[in-house]
Amino acid sequence: MRLLAIDTALDACSVAVLDRDGGQARVTSACEVLGRGHAERLMAMIGEVMAEAGLPFSALDRIAVTAGPGSFTGLRVGLSAARGIALVVGAPAVGIGTLDALADMAREGAVEPCPVFAVLEAKGPEIYGQGFAADGMPLAAPVAMAAADFGLQLPAGALLAGAGAAKVVAACGRTDLRVAHEAAWPDIAAVVRLGAEADPLAHPPEPVYLRPPDAAPARRDEGLFA
């Protein structure tokens, strides 16, 4: 498996190349926190990381890219690059949820397997959130909802991951909630791990938008475990 991973969903612009041959795996990566300007930097960064990895683009077996939630512009930049490279080299592209990657980071550091609820900050009182079972399977679709409502629906002792964790804890006032990390963007290593295992048919490189005009916020009665 030789995989190129891309993340431009949030403030970071990150690229990694996985070169796995049998039991040997090497990951070459780069990350720059840009805020804006992903489009101007991404393709050069991809070329630099590919050169450092010592691989031609024709050797790639798969392209993985974060699909959201995230900024509209950032998502378009990463997804367009991934689709274009996949088309040129004839390799499948897979979309990896931003919240999925944040949850994977928490599972990597957990003492024992447990459900993880990934959360990112959104405007006003809202967050973007999604729950994942101990094996990484989604408990429900990602939602945009009030941080307090999200927190009040969580099971006892729930493990939170992502930059919205503190917002959820403060909004709902629960003291039993645990926080694995408060990362504001995915570690590209998590995108590599998930991208290598993803089924291309089940994870197309399509954007996940949780805000208008593409989607409306979740109703309070939709729940986190539907």
Image: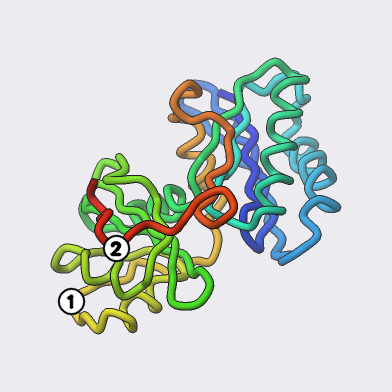
How many neighbours does mark 1 have within 10 angstroms: few (below 14), some (14-19), or many (20 or more)? Answer: few
- Please state which of residues 103 and 120 is positioned toward the viewer in this rendering: 120
Residue 148 falls left or right of residue 82: left
Residue 160's disc number? none
- Please state which of residues 213 and 129 is positioned toward the viewer in this rendering: 213
Tell me how far mark 2 sits from mark 1, CA to CA.
Answer: 22 Å
What residue would you read off at disc 2? 220
Q: Is residue 1 above or below residue 139?
A: above
Secondary-structure class at tag 1: loop
Query: Where does residue 26 sit, x and y in percent of width and height?
Result: 58, 37
Disc 1 residue type (three-letter): Asp
Q: Nearer the viewer, mark 2 or mark 1?
A: 2
Disc 2 residue type (three-letter): Arg
Residue 176's disc number? 1
Which quadrant would the N terminus be assigned to in this image?
top right
Q: Give the residue at x 30% y 66%.
A: 150
Query: Where does residue 72 sit, x and y in percent of width and height?
Result: 66, 53
- Please state which of residues 89 and 204 is positioned toward the viewer in this rendering: 204
- Please state which of residues 113 and 212 is positioned toward the viewer in this rendering: 212
Q: Give the residue at x 45% y 29%.
A: 198
Query: Where does residue 87 sit, x and y in percent of width and height?
Result: 73, 20
